[in-house]
Image (cartoon, rainbow, N blue to C red):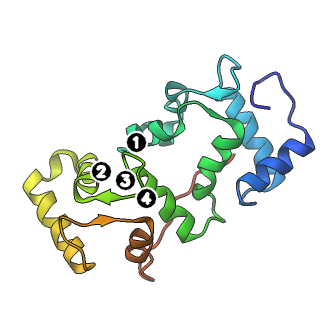
Amino acid sequence: MGNASSILTQYDIEDVQEHSHYLYTQEEIVALYERFCQLDRNSKGYITSDEFLSIPEFSLNPLSHRLVQMVDGLNFKDFVAFLSPFSAKATAQQKIELIFKVYDTDGKGKVTFKDILEVLSSLTGSFMTQEQREQVLSKLMKEAGYDKDSSLSLEDFIKILSTPSLKMEVEVPID
């Protein structure tokens, strides 16, 4: 499974469905497989960061460099699991977990003020000065009960981002 010449069996489809928490139908998995095979230009069975960046929705994303670090070398099964939080059926918690991974640059399970500042810098570019970003982030952290020296765990992140007024509408179209 995973290279363009291989055929996706019913077993493979069910295995990928389970691995991605049943967020995609079997038809959607087949469509994702076709897209994966298009991206896997050399039929290696995995996609590289350059191949991933050929997806316009991701290459235009200001956080694409973070996303690329997460997907380089993914096989089809892991590619679908990576995309799962972008599914219309994904829960807010699943989406927050992906966002946490984007912010957790070193993969140690903690997000620091500096980590969030780096992402904020990528998102705002030259529209805000570093001082403005630090002020905004300090205020947000304080309102959430944290300070500049706090390290946020996934549980902290979920608590902060699970407010009822926050909408998590992050989806990737399958077709």
Q: Amino acid at mark 3?
A: Tyr
In the image, what residue occupies the spot 52% across and 29% down? 54
Rounded to the nearest angstrom, the CA distance separating label 3 from label 2 is 7 Å
Rounded to the nearest angstrom, the CA distance separating label 2 from label 1 is 9 Å
Question: Could you say where residue 38 lies in the image, as x and y percent from the top left?
Answer: 68, 27
Name the mark on residue 66: 1
Question: Could you say where residue 78 lies in the image, as x and y percent from the top left?
Answer: 66, 42
Disc on the earlier residue, 1 or 4: 1
> Is 173 displayed left or right of 107 in the figure?
right
Residue nearest the viewer, comparing 12 with 89: 12
Disc on the earlier residue, 2 or 4: 4
The residue to which callout 4 is attached is: 100
SS type, badge 1: helix
Disc on the earlier residue, 1 or 3: 1
The residue to which callout 2 is attached is: 119
In the image, what residue occupies the spot 37% across and 53% down? 103
Disc 2, disc 4: CB below 8 Å?
A: no
Whether residue 46 is situated above or below residue 89 in the rendered picture: above
The residue to which callout 3 is attached is: 103
Nearer mark to the viewer, of 3 and 2: 3
Q: Amino acid at mark 1?
A: Arg
